[in-house]
Amino acid sequence: MGKVTGFLEIDRQVAKYQPASDRIRHFREFTIPMSDPEVQKQAARCMDCGIPYCHGPTGCPVHNQIPDWNDLVYNNNWEEAIRNLHSTNNFPEFTGRVCPAPCEEACTLNLEDAPVAIKTVEQAIADKAYELGFIRPQPATVHTGKKVAVIGSGPAGMAAAQQLGRAGHEVHLYERESKAGGLLRYGIPDFKMEKNFIDRRVEQMKGEGVTFHCGVNVGVDVKIEQLLADHDAVLYCGGSETPREAGIPGVELAGVHDAMPYLVQQNRRVGRENIDSAGWPADPILAGGKHIVVVGGGDTASDCVGTAFRQGAVKVTQLDIRPQPPEKEDKFAVWPFWATKMRTSSSQAEGAVREFQVATLEFLGEDGVLTGVKCCEVDERRQPIAGTEFVIRADLAFIAIGFRGPFTDSVLKELDGKLTLNTDRRGSTNVVANDKDYKTSVDKLWTAGDIRRGQSLVVWAIREGRQAARAIDEALMGSTVLPR
């Protein structure tokens, strides 16, 4: 370790934000980067803890070698730090911005509520590597003659395509939207991650021989059977995009929307693209001057909150059916696992009113237009408590209660009856494949990411893409040097 007593001498510090009053005036990132010496001091806090739970499986899904690159950063060896980080994570500039950092929850120092600022250091390594020119194309020196198609350019598809391209295969990446990135580009707001980071990776991957086919909806514009015939392997990374049905009366009123069309529209505006594309609604959804209600307590709901404030919403209320969690968890009962405790996102901190242990009973309207949301308090079993009903004024309401699987009008429709699917207890439908070989019930077809495991984190999608790439390489070549 470079600084054995660093965790005793240096206080935890993370990058600060622009004030809420300033950041809601734009859609750019608002994190204020730390200086190199400040980042190095935070890296020095990584203690020689013996068993680094931050690696995983309770911490990092891609098993980042966190103590190693913390030590390299402390010793000012940024080039080796990014090389080490890339050995487990293709896109650390993505995860350094949008990952909730389960690694920090699993950090030994979190027992004292002062974990190492792992996420801050990870983002700094990636940004510094770009600044110093360490990130450039790494084309294969030997080509295998094998041809692989990847469907979907989200984090799973991009990670798999990059790994397979570097292994020497001819890789063709198919994306329904006009630009690559999937959820990263069209679902996650720019104030959390600007899209030039995706563009840089796309250019790197093109330099490595990956061919991008954007604006091509597989199963509609080109048949999956044709891809299977023309390629040695096809990897399906379609994501989980179908919204979970809320079953709330009044959902048909004008002004009630699923969360994703709203977020996609705004990301398209920021990216100077037409808002009407790939089946999303064309009518503008704008929150300026309106009272907004967001149903749901997760990341997507929070993204709706931040987007509404930036569009000029008068008031934003977020409804969460779960009880308000405690401010502090019992460390010895849950560590090193992800703890249920009170968390406030940057968007919620911009002025959202949060209602906990509240059920949405009905969307109310006049002449077919939303005017309010009828709610009530619920008990521990999420059952309504009589006499606690109340109405919140609402001009727009967004339903953000999760996703139940991929779109069914393209690949799944074409492969109906051939592809084995599984429906879990919450009604989510996933493509069946194990996490060893990622093979589906269709010959030459593999799958990875949210479409296999259900909606999850970007970092899990990257892991699945990497592992599926290894499985495909091994199947095609008989052996592989790609890491799991």
Image: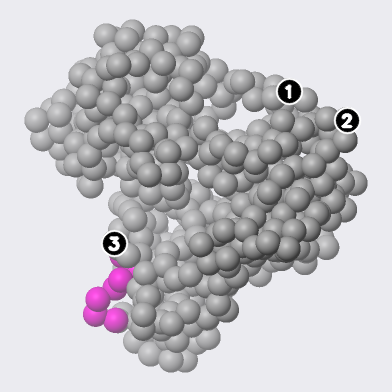
Could you tell me residue 402's position as x and y percent?
Answer: 53, 44
* Magenta region includes residue 51: yes
State which quarter of the image contains the N terminus: bottom left
Q: Nearer the viewer, mark 3 or mark 1?
A: 1
Q: Would you call the spot at circle 2 few (<14 residues within 10 Å), some (14-19), or many (20 or more)? A: few
Point 85% across, 42% down: residue: 371
Callout 3 amino acid:
Pro
Point 51% across, 62% down: residue: 381
Residue 317: numbered disc: none
As displayed, is residue 403 above or below residue 124? above
Residue matched to label 3: 57
Callout 2 amino acid:
Asp
Q: SS of the residue at dot 1?
A: loop
Q: Nearer the viewer, mark 1 or mark 2?
A: 2
Residue matched to label 1: 282
Q: Is residue 109 visible?
A: no
Residue at mark 3 to residue at mark 1: CA–CA distance:
42 Å
Dot placed on the residue nearer the N-terminal end, 1 or 2: 1
Q: SS of the residue at dot 2?
A: loop
